[in-house]
Structure formats: C-alpha cells, structure tokens
Image (cartoon, rainbow, N blue to C red):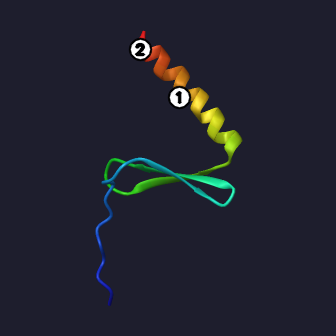
Amino acid sequence: MAAMKPRTGDGPMEVTKEGRSLIMRVPIDGGGRLVVELNAEEAGRLKDCLLGVTNQLAR
C-alpha cells in the first residue's frame, strides 16, 4: 500500500499559463490548494474586481 502524504497549503499563491488557460493555485486554510482555471477575459475581470476591493481598503 502506498504511503499517504499529508496535503498542505504551504507555498506561494501562483498563476501559470497552460495552453490557452491560466491556472491559479491558492493555498487555503486547513491544507490543500484551491485550483482555478481561467481564460484571459475571466482573469481580467477578476483583476478588476480585486483592484476595486483593494482600492476601497486603501482609503
């Protein structure tokens, strides 16, 4: 029987390009990673949303 390795969320948030998609990996509380596949349009909309929220926090 193969040994089970613990899943950890350690490591940086990262985005890589794979084919025509962008793959975003985000460490989450409790271990593991959230993996999201986005196209360029979706990534641009996510960027706009995040900038809007962070600009509000900076005020």
| Alpha carbon separation for disc pair 1 and 2 | 12 Å
Above or below, comparing residue 2 to residue 42 in the picture: below
Q: Residue furthest top?
A: 59
Within 10 angstroms of label 1, few (less than 14), some, or many (20 or more) residues? Answer: few
Q: Position of residue 26 (x, y in %)?
A: 43, 48
Q: Nearer the viewer, residue 51 or 6?
A: 51
Quadrant where the N terminus lies?
A: bottom left
Quadrant where the C terminus lies?
A: top left
Q: Nearer the viewer, residue 32 or 21?
A: 21
Q: Residue at x 45, y 49 (%)?
A: 14
Above or below, comparing residue 3 to residue 40 in the picture: below
Q: Which residue type carries mark 1?
A: Leu
Q: Which residue is mark 1?
A: 50
Q: Secondary structure at mark 1?
A: helix
Left or right: residue 2 versus residue 18 is: left
Where on the picture, by quarter, is residue 43?
top right
Q: Residue at x 64, y 35 (%)?
A: 44
Above or below, comparing residue 33 to residue 49 in the picture: below
Disc nearer the start of the sequence (1/2): 1
Residue 20 has which mark? none
Left or right: residue 7 versus residue 49 is: left
Q: Which residue type carries mark 2?
A: Ala
Q: Which residue is mark 2?
A: 58
Numbered marks: total: 2
